[in-house]
Amino acid sequence: KNQVEQSPQSLIILEGKNCTLQCNYTVSPFSNLRWYKQDTGRGPVSLTIMTFSENTKSNGRYTATLDADTKQSSLHITASQLSDSASYICVVSAPTGANNLFFGTGTRLTVIP
Amino acid sequence: EAGVTQSPTHLIKTRGQQATLRCSPISGHTSVYWYQQALGLGLQFLLWYDEGEERNRGNFPPRFSGRQFPNYSSELNVNALELEDSALYLCASSYGNQPQHFGDGTRLSIL
């Protein structure tokens, strides 16, 4: 069964600290993996997208890694800011079709001063 | 460039009523997707429209339906509303295999 699991479910960190969010998936075949940031009351916004051959991709203070062999991805946030408080959603795509997007339930990150 | 816009922002209905949610995609995008995001749950795929045709639907009952207009905007209709339909309904648009861009959703509350 195609699944995407994220951990932790929630996380609280101090402003300025780093953190790493995890995503494990069983989706096969695999096309790409995306990380989205969803602020409260807003729609998800794409942070990174990685294909099978990419191991790392950065977007400012956000760095995503992908190990396609172990079917694991991580999102590392450096020097966290209060504005990083949001839900982070991992989305894994199979090669074709809109319902071939598999969503994790997200990690709720809270950055406190 | 204007993003995906959804209306209304909030919608309050009672059980048994019907709700209509609207979505305008990014200019040039031909595909529109609808998702349901219930509290504490991940996004659940509802419907995919492309070039005016329904291409696929998720595991939802037939009372969830929609359409896409010639200008690529879309409506999601939910009939015979039930309490468990309370959720954030997100619309996304894309062109071809490009990543989806999401709107900010419609918060549907069923009393």
Image: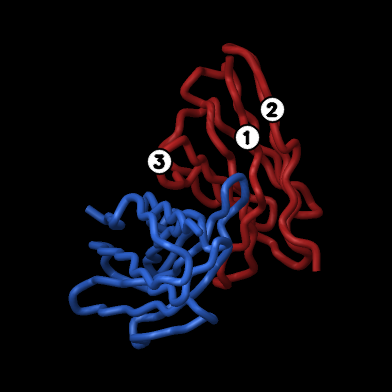
Callout 3 amino acid: Leu
Q: Which chain is blue?
A: A
Q: Label 1, label 3: how many angstroms apart (C-alpha)?
A: 14 Å
Task: Indicate whether B98 appears above or below A58.
Answer: above
Q: Position of residue B15 (x, y in %)?
A: 57, 12
Q: Position of residue B95 (x, y in %)?
A: 64, 68
Chain B: give its colour: red
Q: Chain of mark 1?
A: B
From this viewpoint, is residue A70 visible?
A: yes
Query: SS at mark 3?
Result: loop
Q: Residues within 10 Å of mark 3 (few under 14, many from 20)?
A: few
Q: In the image, B31: left or right of B26?
A: left
Q: Which mark is residue B11?
A: 2
Q: In the image, A62: left or right of A44?
A: left
Q: Which mark is residue A59?
A: none
Q: Are marks 1 and 2 in contact (CB under 8 Å)?
A: yes
- The answer to whether dots 3 and 2 both sit on one chain is yes
Callout 1 amino acid: Arg
Mark nearer the N terminus (1 vs 2): 2
Mark nearer the N terminus (3 vs 2): 2
Q: In the image, B65: left or right of A2?
A: right
Residue displayed at 43% across by 66% down: A96
Query: SS at mark 2?
Result: strand
